[in-house]
Every structure is written in structure tokens, then in C-alpha cells.
Image: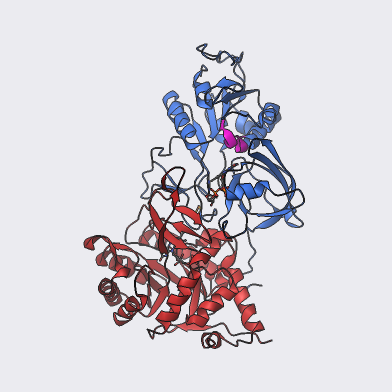
Chain colours: A blue, B red
Amino acid sequence: MSAGTRGWTAEKRLVFAKILSNAEIARTIYRMEFEIMDEDGNSYPAPAPGQFINVYLTGGRMLLPRPFSVCDSAAGRLTLVYGAVGAGTRALAGFAPGERIRVGPPAGNGFDVAAAGTAAGRGRIVLVGGGVGAAPLLLLARRIRETLDGGDAEISGGMTFGGAASATGVVSGVNATYAPPARSPALHAVLGYRSEPFLVSAFEKYCDQTDVATDDGASGFHGTAVDLLKEQTLTGGEFFFACGPRVMLRALARFAGGQGIPLQVSLEERMGCGYGACLGCACKVASPAEIQHRKVCKDGPVFNGSEVVWDV
Amino acid sequence: MCKPDLRVRLCGLEWKNPVATASGTFSARDSGKYYDFSRLGAITAKGLSAVPWQGNPAPRVAETWGGMLNAIGLENPGADRFIAEELPFVRDCIGNAGTRVIVNVAGHSVEEYCMAAEKLDAADVDMLELNISCPNIREGGIGFGTDPRMAAAVTSAVRKRVKKPLIVKLTPNVTDITEIARAAEAAGADALSLINTLTGMRIDVKRRAPVLANGSGGLSGPAVKPVAVLMVWRVARAVGIPIIGMGGIMCGEDAAEFLMAGASAVAVGTAALANPAAPAEILEELTAFMAENGFADVEALRNALR
Ligand SMILES: Cc1cc2nc3c(=O)[nH]c(=O)nc-3n(C[C@H](O)[C@H](O)[C@H](O)COP(=O)(O)OP(=O)(O)OC[C@H]3O[C@@H](n4cnc5c(N)ncnc54)[C@H](O)[C@@H]3O)c2cc1C
Ligand SMILES: Cc1cc2nc3c(=O)[nH]c(=O)nc-3n(C[C@H](O)[C@H](O)[C@H](O)COP(=O)(O)O)c2cc1C
Ligand code: FES
């Protein structure tokens, strides 16, 4: 029904999804898989790595949508990995397979995978995750793996993967539990957790090397993902993709900046609408433009580490 | 069951129906992907100033029970860029569907309001809405809209400089809103819109700090609706100019409530954050409500309150 003069169809809409599974994979961390229902399944756009979706919960306490990165996706099915941290995510954790949730279409600008290939002479892609920040990096790892294996020129062009360009290894021996890699892998994940790792085997499927760090040293390297990265010899030929707590991303941005390594980060910010209408989700960027704010929900959530103004 | 006539007249202009978007919660490029806004009676652009404004640092929004706080700080690209880049797109989407275009005007001084309003008056817009909730920097940051004298001063100054119908948008953060409403009417306002957001605060008790970077923000959403309905009802009995009612409208019956309280039209704000297509859905629900309850037109609804 359109009173307008033009034929009009909605480019975007909220759809219902049926939950296929929803299980705790680490303490307070859940993995939910769902399927877009009915006729919407076919028209639902395939999410790109780094895009997020809005989940619409109901109730007086939960007026606003909750944004979650897409952790994995194939053929109308999506996987989210989320921490139960508040009312909405705790409610989400209570959903059982077969129940329905309402979700929006994939939103925002994801990781610019092509940039990793076009930066000349890049030898290694490093995915740096902190906690649930690992979620969007998994879909990214999968896409990069597919591209590498498929020999897609877009990202492998001009790159020497896993070559002898560097003898990457641990510089200092402070961390006994951490075994240094023998050589530089093409796709390397460095994942930091508070205490209990998750998604590690999923990353191992796609990555040439997957390293784990924990704040309490319960497994892997004792320290943060960025600490672990600093323990390694870098050639400057790396390309970083990262998602995690802002403090981690800030530390990584400083480190990457100092080493001249390009970095893309996926940011979190409180959102109003989650689709570009309210300007609730400001990210301050260094820009010559009159307005130094960008929308995390539309211009992001992925930004270049060097453009973000971290000290706000 | 009759098919209701939804047309309303405001300040000599016909709207094809009484449902508009509220300022700051609508973006033609983004909202327009979810619903056809050329079906609405009017759309309202976000607050525009004479020069670009940066807005506040993040976090700018916080959810509350039944609502939300916002402290966007009126980030906007300035009237010139809006006119050059946004307005042609809005007009193109509307075509000849007749949807009215309202621009919301912000300023920190009477002169700034006038400058922005003049630029917008000369552009292809239908009505101007003066957001007088802004602080007056010349008078120690007191909101223009909280003092009848200042509200009248900015209204009459802008009124003299523009030709288009002038709506004055009132803040609810006052002791007696009818006093401000009368002052705006006497100073030349053609219509009033209310309510803007109610000032509020949330504290994160674990971080022991305000949730919003700005400290305080404006409360909107269903939690404010009873306050808004009462204010519309009071103002409707105090002035002779039409009222655009808003504050927490989430469904068609909420819209009907404002019309019964005396508003001539309504605007949908926060609902569009909770559901991107809300304004169009609310229009459909209002139409259905009127049909089912035998309201032939909006005037019938406005006169229905016993
Ligand atoms: C682009 C993006 C991607 C995200 N991806 C993931 C993910 O993959 N896995 C995951 O566990 N979390 C992710 N988050 C964070 C997630 O959105 C919040 O944890 C969630 O909204 C908390 O909701 P709640 O109701 O449980 O918490 P409450 O604190 O009760 O929420 C209150 C309000 O604050 C908002 N909010 C609270 N924490 C955050 C936060 N960290 N970021 C943004 N808004 C917040 C909520 O959306 C809600 O509007 C992402 C955030 C963004 C912006
Ligand atoms: C995110 C956000 C931004 C807003 N920006 C403006 C603005 O620029 N100018 C204005 O006059 N009102 C602004 N408002 C107020 C709304 O237009 C409306 O008056 C108020 O939110 C009450 O209606 P609601 O409960 O339907 O949202 C804003 C509200 C929100 C939630
Ligand atoms: S959350 Fe509304 S614009 Fe980004």
C-alpha cells in the first residue's frame, strides 16, 4: 500500500529468525545460531565480515536494538557470539531453539579486506581479538582463508604469504608457556581473553597460526593479546585487523602506529537507532572536515586505527 | 466502516495526514530504506544551525525504563550543506506526493537563530520549526524556552525575518508551559510543537559516573507520554494556534490520544529508533483506529474528548 507517487519497495526491513541453537561456550559467553524465516530467508543479504546486526528485544526495559557482530554466516543462517552482560543479553541467553527473535539486516561498513592485499608487500595478516571481540574476526578469517585458497587476486595479489621474509619469533623469553612460531604464517590470529578462551578451534580451522593470551595466564600466553604481539618480531609487513575492548584497541593502535603497520579496528559505541538516523553513535576521528564525528553504525563499525581519536 | 479523511490544515497548509517524524530521529537516506516517507503528512529534519556543530562526545545515548536519554548536542552539518546535499534528495523522494518538509532550527543566540532561519526560509522547505530548547550563551546558558521573555524575543526576531509558517517547539522543562506557549503565540508563532525531551540523568553505579559523557540528557519515549499528553491538553486550551503533539507515541492509539488532547498533528520520534518503520506503521494504525471507531476525520477525533 503506497500513497506515494512512485512504486516503492522497502530496501531494508526487520525480519524474524528462528533460533537453531543457543549454548554457553564459556562462562557467560553464548553462541547463538539462527535462520532467517520463511520468504525472507532468500532476500536477506549476506553479511560481510565486520558488519553487525541489530537484535530487537521487547519490553519496557529494552526499547533500543542491541547490536552484535556477525560471527559466522552461510545461506540465510547467522551465528552470533555474545557475552551476557546486561538485561538484553541475559534475556537473549534464555532463548531456546525453535523460538523467534526479530533482527535487522546486516549493517555498517565491515573490514576492508582488499586493503590488506593492495598494501604492497604485506606478508602477513594478523587478526587481534579481545574477548567477544573475536566474533567478527572469525567471519573475516573464513573469508580471507577462502580468498587465499581460491587464489583470489584481490587479496593475494603481490603478497608473499608465509615466506621467509621474516624469522618471526619471541624476542624475550619472559613467557615460558608461549611457544614461538617457526615462521611467518599468512593468516595469524592472536586472541586475548580474561581467563577462559573460546572460539579457538574455529580460528584454527582458518588460520595458519592461532595464539591465545589470557590475563590470568590460565592458558596460553600470560598477558594481553597486544602484549603477546609485542613479544614477536614484526617485519612491518603485517596488516592488522582487530576488535575488542577500547583500551586494547587503543594500545594496539599506538603499537601499530609506531611500527607503521596498517590497522583496521571494529569499534563499539552506544547506539540509539543502529541504522543512521539519530547520531547517537559518534566516533571521533581526526579529519579536516568540519564535523569530526562519524557514525559507528553507518560509517563504521570498522575504522582505520590511525583515523580514530582514541583519547576522548 | 467509513474510510476516514485524514487531511489536516496547519497554518494555511494542507497536510495529507496528521503524522510527521520528530526532529533528530529521521534521516531521509537511512529511514527511507525502511519505509516510504512520502506517505507521511510531514517529515522534520534534524536541528540545523547557521554553521556546522560538532555535537557532544560519546556516549550520547542511554536506555532507560520505557525510554531513553540523548545528549547528541545537535550535531549538524549546518543549514547550507543541508540545503545543498540533503534537501534535493528529500524533495526527490517526495516527488509530488505532497508530504510537507519541516526544518528544525537551532541557535545559541537570537542572531544565530535568525541566520539559520533565513537561509532555510529561502530554500525549498514548507515550514520552519524553532527549537527553543537551546541554551542562550549570551544569558549564561539559560534555555530560550524556559523564559517567556526570551522565548518571545527569539520568536519575534525570527518571525520578522522569515516568510514561511513558523512553528515554535516548546520544552517541557518549565513550571508552566502555557505561559511560554502564550508568549510564543503573542510573538508571532503560527503553530506550536511539544514536547521536546525532559532533562534527565543516569548514573552507572559500577563506574560511579554518569552514563552520558555530557552528564545529563533529554528523556524521550513512552515513559514521557503522559507528561506530553497533559501539556498538549493544557496548551490547546491556552492558545488559538495549532499544535503538533509528540512525546512517546509508539502506536496509532497513542497518536489518537494526542489528537484527542487537542493536537492538530503528531510527530513520532523515539519509536522510530525502536522500530525503523514506526512512523508509517503508526499512520496505518491511526487510520484503522479512526475507521473502526467511526471517526470521519481528524477534527472529529479532536472534538471527541468528553
Ligand atoms: C557494532 C557492535 C558490535 C557488537 N558486537 C558484539 C558481539 O559480537 N558480541 C557481544 O557480546 N557484544 C557485542 N557488542 C556489544 C553489545 O551490543 C552489548 O553487549 C549489548 O548491547 C548489551 O546489551 P544488554 O542489554 O545486555 O546490556 P545493558 O547494559 O542492559 O544495555 C543497555 C543499553 O546499552 C547498550 N550497550 C550496553 N553495552 C554496550 C556496548 N558494549 N556496546 C554498545 N552498546 C552497548 C545496549 O545496546 C542497550 O541499549 C557490539 C556492539 C557494537 C556497537
Ligand atoms: C536522538 C534524538 C535527537 C533529537 N534531536 C532533536 C533536534 O535536533 N531538535 C529538536 O527540536 N528535537 C530533537 N529531539 C526531540 C524529539 O524531536 C521529540 O521532541 C522528543 O524526542 C519527544 O518525542 P518522542 O518521545 O517520540 O521521541 C530529539 C530526540 C531524540 C531521541
Ligand atoms: S545509532 Fe543512530 S545513527 Fe548510529
Which quadrant holds the C terminus of chain A?
top left
Asked whether the viewer can see residue A107, the reply is no
Q: Residue furthest top?
A: A173
Residue positioned 70% across, 56% down in the render: A16
> Magenta part of the protein: which range?
A128-137
Residue B297 in percent (x, y) is at: 57, 86
Asked whether the viewer can see residue B301, the reply is yes
Residue B301 in percent (x, y) is at: 55, 85
**From the viewer's perspective, is residue B195 above or below residue B66?**
below
Which quadrant holds the N terminus of chain A?
bottom right
Dividing the image into four equal quarters, which quarter contains ligand 2?
A: bottom left
Numbered disc total: 0
**From the viewer's perspective, is residue A236 above or below residue B131?**
above
**From the viewer's perspective, is residue A268 above or below residue B267?**
above
Residue A269 in percent (x, y) is at: 49, 46
Report the predominant secondary structure element of the magenta stretch: helix
Residue A279 in percent (x, y) is at: 46, 54
Left or right side of B2 for B134: left
Magenta run includes residue B162: no
Left or right side of B184 for A191: right
Image-quadrant location for residue B184: bottom left
Residue toward you, A4 or B300 = B300
